Image (cartoon, helix red, strand yellow):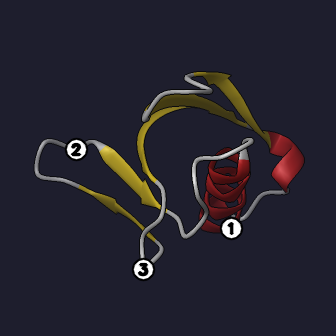
Amino acid sequence: MKLSIIAHPNTKNPRIEKDLLGATHVYVNAPPLEGKANRAVVEALAKHFEVSRGKVILLWGEKSKNKVFEIG
């Protein structure tokens, strides 16, 4: 399954939620430095969908707030 998300690094309250338009927002504590936020988003998505971290692959948006993940 491909999932398009909007990442929000450096937040105090980590969570995953959908907005009124159906976009998925992932809020993580990690800063957007050296891929730390991307790793935190992968962990959050893996926990949310109850799959291993290896099944969550970043396809697009390594340095963008808008990201596309493959979850298998």
Query: Badge 2 is on which residue?
Result: 22
Q: Tell me if mark 2 has few (under 14), some (14-19) or many (20+) residues whose alpha carbon lies within 10 angstroms of its own.
A: few
Circles 2 and 1, Cβ within 8 Å, touching? The answer is no
Identify residue for label 3: 12
First in sequence: mark 2 vs mark 1: 2
Q: Is residue 26 left or right of residue 50?
A: left
Q: Whole-percent x and y of residue 1? A: 60, 31
Front: mark 2 or 3: 3
Instruction: Tell me the residue at 69%/30% (across/down).
Output: 58
Amino acid type shown at disc 1: Lys
Quadrant of the image containing the C terminus: top right
Q: Position of residue 61 (x, y in %)?
A: 55, 23
- Give the residue type at disc 3: Lys
SS of the residue at dot 2?
loop
Specify which label sits upstream in the sequence, 3 or 1: 3
**Cα–Cα gap, marks 2 and 3:** 23 Å
Up the image or down, 32 lies above or below 44; here it is above
Residue shown at the point (42%, 70%) measured from the top left: 11
Label 3 vs label 1, nearer the camera:
3
In this rendering, would 57 be left or right of 2?
A: right
| Image x and y of residue 45, in percent | 62, 56
Amino acid on which disc 2 is placed? Gly
- Label 1, secondary structure: give it: helix
Q: Nearer the viewer, residue 34 or 65?
A: 34
